[in-house]
Amino acid sequence: MSEFALIRAFLTDIGPPRADVALGVGDDCALLALPAGQLLAVSLDTLSAGIHFFPDCDPTAIGHKALAVGLSDLAAMGATPAWSTLALTLPAADDAWLRAFCAGFAALSNAHGIRLVGGDTTRGPLSVTVQVHGQVPLGAAIRRDGARPGDLVCVSGTLGDAGLALRGLLAGEPVAPALRRRLEYPTPRVELGLALRGLASAMIDLSDGLAGDLGHILTASGVGAELELAKLPLSPPVAEVVARTGDWSLPLASGDDYELCFCLPPAHAAQCQAFAATLDYPLRHIGQIHANAGLRCRLPDGGYLADSLSGYDHFAAGRR
Ligand code: ADP
Ligand code: MG
């Protein structure tokens, strides 16, 4: 199949048609209308075979995740998804692979009303780059630099599931399907991000682990935080590993959760709680922002996790 036949067959009609797409796939550029009073929120991510997914990974999952990580970034800013572009590097034009990839990409596109408006297709080692474009009213975006002492630190979903699934797959062990879905089909928390406009003071999505990602908020905001590890939302399998090993690295420092971590002025807590009741995943208050810099993690027994200040590496297996 030629490059152009491939584009025509698979990529011209992904996601719902939108009135703000004056011209989509097929010309030198897409033409997009940004409504007055809105800013464009843009984010780009690459997934490479052998680094971000196993070379034999189900292509439907690759299509889903390639878009999901971008939608998670839009969610973390409180932006509404609008348009995507897709750079595909393929070793070959494999019909079945492309059909499955596009099924995953399209299903998530439809779920969030985001339209694929252009891209690039080349031959080479398998790699997928997606740029997402969202809209956010002037002044409404939720940035990393707005956390203030006294704010509650909150997180969505459960932490460490994707990391536990990845550990199992790397070890060649059987991984429970529900856990594997958390790694391969992450759910971007778009509706939560939008609901937190006007409520959250700062927000980030969790792609590299809570300690490191919350650390970005702390640095940007010039504050510190204390987390109560007993309050971390953990699925039963992750809770079992933590209880058995005393190692908190799964929930604190494993990647690919794509949950949202946000800071909430106490005055907004009731409104947030009311919204949380409408969700089918948990929202948990796990700690508090303080004026003194650094991240302190209080253990369930009242002590503190050693070396939590510098994050990531210090949570490597076996250390505490
Ligand atoms: P050009 O040579 O002008 O850059 P291309 O030949 O790369 O254009 O692409 C032709 C059209 O197909 C363009 O509108 C481009 O945006 C679109 N396109 C190419 N690859 C993809 C892709 N992977 N996903 C979506 N649209 C694509
Ligand atoms: Mg051109």
Image: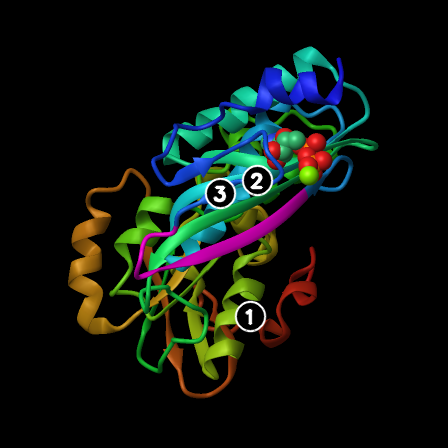
Where residue 89 sits: x, y (%)?
75, 33
Residue drawn at x 46%, y 88% as measured from the top left: 292
What kind of element bears circle 3? strand
For badge 1, the amino acid type reads Leu
Of pointers 1 and 2, the one earlier in the residue sequence: 2
- Quadrant assignment, res 124: top right
Judge from the rendering whether residue 300 lies leftward or rightward of residue 19; answer left or right: right
Ligand 1 closer than 8 Å to the CB at disc 1? no
206 falls in the magenta region: no
The one of 150 and 9 positioned closer to us in this rendering = 9
Q: Secondary structure at mark 1?
A: loop
The C terminus: image quadrant: bottom right
Residue 31: image tag: 3
Q: Which residues are magenta?
A: 34-46
The residue tagged 1 is 305
Q: Are marks 1 and 2 in contact (CB under 8 Å)?
A: no
219 left or right, relative to 98 = left
